[in-house]
Structure formats: structure tokens, C-alpha cells
Image (cartoon, rainbow, N blue to C red):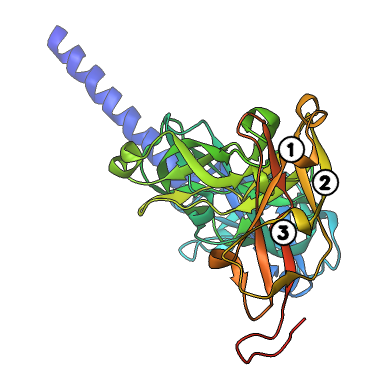
Amino acid sequence: MQKSKILAFLLALVVSIVLWFYAVTVVNPDDTITISGISVQFEGTEALTSQGLMLTGGDSTKVSIKVSGRRSDLKELNNETVTAIADVTRIAASGSYQLSWSVVWPSTVATGDISETSRAPSRISVTVSDIKENPEVPIELEYTGEPKTGYMIDKSNLTLGTQSISVRGPAEEVNKIARAVVRVDVTDADALIDTDCPVVLLDKDGNELSLSQYVTSSADSVRVTIPILQYKDIKLNATLISGGGATSEDAEVTIEPSTLRVTGNTAVLDAMADELTIRTIDLAQITGTETFEVTPELPSGVTSRADSQTVKITVTLKGLVTKEFTVPTANILRKEAPAGMTFADQNVKITVRGRASVMSTLRMEDLTVTADFSRHYDAAAKQVELEVALPANVSAGVIGGPYTVQVSLSETDGGNTES
């Protein structure tokens, strides 16, 4: 008896389930669902572009709809099979707009079998901007850090894959772009750097710009090649030769630049001395201040890295005075003079330089002036160069030479009298 009751209960349960399923699927087949996250497709963007316009907001909008229909049809609907369409063809100027939108159902569902009961949002907000293009934004190279000690950047031979890029996008953003930079970290570098670096866009004040996805450029990165060279700083000096009453103690010498940076391989730099003499200067030829421009001669394999290849040496003599002596030609000693030779000049003016204490006691009689015809006679010019000597214990010297006198030869040995 108990067993029969259990069987009857189970049979009733099965019948109830069958009746419920029948009622749901056959007697009452309709249902309502909400489809969210439907992407919006915009028609007429080509028309915007032809007018110099572009969508810059709202183009990523998602919509949702609530629909009713038979379950067999509703099963075909989701945010991948249903599409929302908005038309931008009628937009003719930049600004913000509210657009209506329509729904496109999948081809497997008859539109008469389903009905839309609500939608969100009811209209789509979009932003339209003027298109601006800057065809030539200059690219600059910026360094961070410093190369390894004893190494330098060879700025004269660095290369960028391109000197400029073109940028296109909304006018309000493109107008902010003043220049572009690529930044390279050279910290402790001791060899060639050859890498791709991202391009960073800056405004006129040098601030990095954070631009929208609507801004595009011809290149997001640039190839950068930076030679890193080993260098050595060489001290420059000049050798002074005493003369004309001046010694190195009387001279003030400035060399600009005072050091020269050179590059080369390790072997040639190690072999090069720490100082380099670039000029020998005879102080006898200096009066007051003299300036020399010198191009240093460097060993093979060594290259100057100075901005200018010339070095300026300035020599100034201080604490010296000059005195002029008028020496009669009758006082000139003659050595191996031709027969019949006479001096055409009556006097020779000779300038001597030295410290004031010395020059105050020096007299004309202290000068020994010699005309050595065997060594210094110019027959064509009919003049002889003079040798001027001072006492050995006098710290002074002759400047302003060479000193010469004209000569006359009387007629001898069939020659003619010349003057």
C-alpha cells in the first residue's frame, strides 16, 4: 500500500513538470530580454573627412535595448549580432551633437517577431573637430646622464632616422604641438649607441603633451645613432725664446683655449703627452702685445674636438722700456769692406729695450755696430746689414731690426762710380 502511494506521487510530479514545460514553450512562448554593450557604427564618416572634419568623441559609445519576442528568436540576439547605426552625414561643422540611432537585427530573425520596448541612451552624444595636419614637426635630440669618465658624445657625427615628423588630428590638439624630442640615456656609455627611441611631443613651453588617440603621427619612434668616443684633455703651451732684452719673466702669456680635447683609440691617447707645445715665440720680435692664431699639429690618429681648430696665443711684455740711439756711420766698424766703399747714410737709429734700471745707464758708446760685408752685403740693393752688440753684462737687447745702411762704391778696377 505504501509503495503504491510513492509511485503515484512520482507519477504526479513527472506529469506536473511536463505540463509546465509545455505551458512555457508552447502555450506561452514569449519573453523579454535586455541586450547591453551594443557597439555603434557611424555612417557618413567619409563625408566628414571630405569636409575636413573628424569624430573626436562618442564614437566608442555602447548602447542597450530591451526587446520582447519568442524565446526561439530572442536566443539569436546579443551584443555581437545586434548593431546600432548612427548617421553623421548631415554634420557640416565642428561642435557637439545629439544623434538618433537605429537598430539592425540579424538576418536570422524576422523583425516582425520581436519588438523593442526601450533603449538607453535615447540619443548618442558625439563631438566633431576640425582636422589639422602639421607636415613638419622638427625633432630634437636630448640626452640624460653622462658617458663613462673619459668618454664623450661625438655630436658632429650623431644621426637621426628623420629630422621631422608629420602629425594629423583634431586642430585643438595639433595646434599645441611645437616640437618633438627623442630622449637618450647615455649614462656610463663607452660604445656606440644605436637604438630606436620613442618620439615625445612638446608644447611651446617644453611641456610634454598628453594627446588623444585621434592624433596620429608618421612615426612613433626614431632610429638614433650616437658615437661615443674616448678622449683626453691636453694642456697647451708656448715656448718663449729670450731676446730684445725680454725674458719669460717679462712676458704674460694667455692661450685660449688653454686645453684641447682630442679623441682617438686607447693606444694613441696613452702615447700622447699631457702637454703640447703649439708655438715657439721669439720675444725679440714682440713689441707691446702680440696675438698669434695657431692650428695645433696633432699625431696621426688623433682628432681635435674643439669648436674651433685655431688657438689664440696672446703675449704681452711688461716692465720694459725702450731707448733709441743715433749712431754715426763713422762709428760703424767695417769688416772686409770693398775698396772705395763709403756709407751713403750719415747716421743709423737703433732701438734697445730692457728694464728701466738698465736702460738709464746705457750709452751710445756701449753699442758695438759692425758692417760685415763678407756675410751681410747685398750687392744688388747696395746695402749692408749691421750687427749690433751690447756689453755681455748688460741685460738689454736690440729690437726693431734688421738695421741696414746704403753704401756707395767709387770707380775702381774699371768699374763705374755708383751711389
Residue designated by label 2: 325
Q: Secondary structure at mark 1?
A: strand
Compare residues 25 and 195 and report the one nearer the observer: 195
Q: Position of residue 305 (x, y in %)?
A: 52, 48
Disc 1 and disc 2: Cα gap in Å?
24 Å
- The disc placed on residue 191 is none
Mark 3 to mark 2 CA distance (whole Å): 12 Å
* Tag 3 residue: 403
The residue carrying pointer 1 sits among few (fewer than 14), some (14 to 19) or many (20 or more) residues within 10 Å by Cα, namely some
Q: Residues within 10 Å of mark 2 (few under 14, many from 20)?
A: some
- SS assignment at label 2: strand
Residue 32, percent from left and from top: 57, 41
Q: Is residue 154 left or right of residue 13?
A: right
User: What is the distance, in whole Å, between disc 1 and disc 3 at their CAs?
Assistant: 24 Å
The residue under label 1 is which amino acid type? Answer: Thr
Depth check, front residue: 75 or 183:
183
Image quarter where the C terminus lies is bottom right
CB-based contact (under 8 Å), mark 1 and mark 2: no
Q: Residue at x 77, y 57 (%)?
A: 330
**Which of the 4 image quadrants contains residue 12?**
top left
Residue at 15%, 14% (x, y): give it.
4
Instruction: Single out the mark in the foreground, 1 or 2.
Output: 2
